[in-house]
Amino acid sequence: MSTVDPSQPRVQDPPPTSVGVRADRPRFLVRRLADAPVVECHCGPSARLLTYPEADQINVHVTTIVDATEHYHKITTEYYYILEGNGTLYLDHQPIEVEPGTLVVIEPGVRHRLVSVTGVKTLVMGVPALDPADEYFDEDASRT
């Protein structure tokens, strides 16, 4: 029978070179929404709290969407969490009504577009982090 020494930590910090920790990055990041760079994208103004290539495991954006262009991804799974506003999210052309508190998981290959009269403030997370090369529109669907 083994015993646990309560004076010893139960979980140790991973070494700096372990999987998931890159030696070329700080071990933590703190960024406030007010300090995040805002870029215009096909969905609307997007505050980039964490984005590719700064992070390759996940992106975290806060995007205000009024009339997004339909698109899809071949690699990234996106998670939309609705913070404010109401709208219609089209998933492979099927309308889904969204409101604050709604979480939608969008797997690779699903064409999606969010439309709202007043705008929908959305927390958008992508795993792995969305590389702009993994954003496809029907006019460039032949791109490999």
Image (cartoon, rainbow, N blue to C red):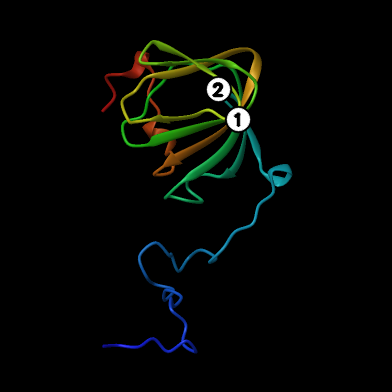
Q: Tell me which amino acid carries mark 1.
A: Thr
Q: Position of residue 130 (x, y in %)?
A: 43, 38
Mark 1, secondary structure of its residue? strand
Quadrant into which the C terminus falls: top left
Residue at position x 60%, y 30% from top?
Answer: 63
Task: Verify CB contact (< 8 Å) between mark 2 and mark 1.
Answer: yes
Which residue of the protein is positioned furthest toward the right in this rendering?
A: 34
Give the side of residue 57 with respect to residue 43, left or right: left
List the residue tagged with mark 1: 63
**Would you place residue 80 above or below residue 138 in this image?**
below
Q: Residue at x 35, y 65 (%)?
A: 19
Secondary structure found at label 2: loop
User: How far apart are labels 2 and 1 at the CA level?
Assistant: 7 Å
Residues packed near mark 2 inside 10 Å, few (<14), some (14 to 19) or many (20 plus): some
The three-letter amino acid code for the residue at tag 2 is Cys
At x 51%, y 51%, the residue is 54
x and y percentages locating residue 60 in the rendered image: 54, 42
- Indicate the position of residue 78 as horizontal and vertical percent values: 43, 34
Judge by depth and name the residue closer to the eye, 117 or 5: 5
The quadrant the N terminus occupies is bottom left
**What numbered label is drawn on residue 43?**
2
Nearest the camera: 3 or 17? 3
Q: Earlier in the sequence, mark 2 or mark 1?
A: 2
| Residue at (39% x, 61% y) in the render | 20
Against 40, is 69 above or below?
above
Disc 1 packing (10 Å; few <14; some 14–19; many ≥20): many
Comparing 38 with 27, the one in front is: 27
- Which residue is farthest front? 1
Checking the image for residue 124, the label placed there is none
Q: Position of residue 22 (x, y in %)?
A: 43, 64
Asked which quadrant contains residue 41, the reply is top right
